[in-house]
Amino acid sequence: MNILYAVCRAVVAVLMRLVFRLEVKNPEHLPRRGPVLLVANHSSFLDPPAIGSVAPRQLWFLAKEALFRIPLFGPLLGRLNARPVRREGRDPGALRIALRILEAQGALLIFPEGTRGDEGVLRPAKAGAGMLAVTSGAPVVPVYIRGSGRAWPRGRRFFRPVKITVAFGPPLAFDGSRHGDRRAQYQAACREMMAAIARLKDSVAAQGAAREPRVSRAQI
C-alpha cells in the first residue's frame, strides 16, 4: 500500500465514522490477495471513499475523465490509485488499464451503472462491466452502499450527516474461457452482478428494519 493512500485512507475512515456513522458488513468476503473486481451501486461522490476506507486491502478506481482536469485534485486522484475513464461511448483504453490492474493482482472498484443515480434505485449495468468481469476471469465481489445518496445526493452542494452502510457480498465467478456468444456472456454477467447487489440491498434493508424499535398499540 503506498504511503499517501494509507494516510488518506486512515483519515477518511475516521471522518466517515464520525460524520456518517459508517458501518461495514461482511468485509471478509473481499479476498486479501490476488485479483478481484468490486462492483457497487452508485448514488454519491461519497461512494469511493466510503468503500475504500472499509475495504481490508488497497483498491484501485476508475473515475470520470473530467475530474483529472481539476487543478491539484486531478493529480491527487492519480496518486490515490484512480484512473480516468470516458463516460460517453466506448473507452478501450480504460478497459486495457482495468485489465492491467487485475493482471497485476490488484483490487479494482467499478460502478457498473456508469454514473450516479437516486438512492436505493438500481439500474442495469453497462456492457463494459460484464466484458471486464468475463474477460479478466477475476473473482467479482458485489458491494451495496446504503445512505450515501441521502447524505450527498446528485445536485446538492453540501452533504448531510446521514448514516452510511457498506455491505460486501460473496464473490461471483465468470468463466471467460467458455465458447459461445461473447455478447450474451457479457449481458449475463451484468445481470448477475446487479442481482447480487440487489440481494445485498434487501439484506441491509431487512437488518435495518429489524433494529428499528417497534411501537406497540398501547404506545399509539
Image: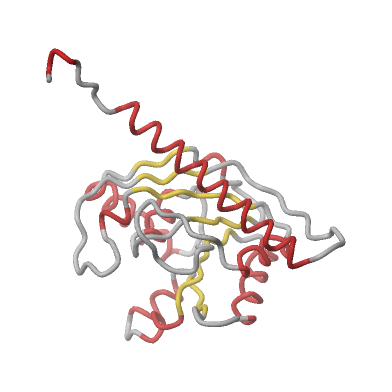
Say which residue appears at 74% left-offset and 63% top-offset. 184
Total labels: the figure holds 0
Say which residue appears at 19% left-offset and 65% top-offset. 158
Q: Position of residue 178 (x, y in %)?
A: 85, 58
Instruction: Classify 82 as above or below 108.
Output: below
Left or right: 119, with 193 as reference point: left
Q: Position of residue 212 (x, y in %)?
A: 27, 28
Left or right: 189, with 67 as reference point: right
Q: Position of residue 4 (x, y in %)?
A: 41, 66
Q: Looking at the rendering, in which quadrant would you find the C terminus?
A: top left
State whether residue 42 appears in this view: yes
Say which residue appears at 60% left-offset and 81% top-offset. 90
Instruction: Classify 169 as above or below 58.
Output: above
Tell which of 130 and 143 is nearer to you: 130
Tell which of 179 and 6 is nearer to you: 179
Report the coloring of the rendering: secondary structure
Say which residue appears at 71% left-offset and 49% top-offset. 173
Left or right: 134, with 147 as reference point: right
State whether residue 7 appears in this view: no
The answer to which image quadrant residue 10 occupies is bottom left
Instruction: Classify 150 as above or below 80.
Output: above
Tell which of 170 and 89 is nearer to you: 89
The answer to which image quadrant residue 94 occupies is bottom right
Residue at far right of view: 179
Q: Position of residue 80 (x, y in %)?
A: 44, 69
Residue at far top of view: 218
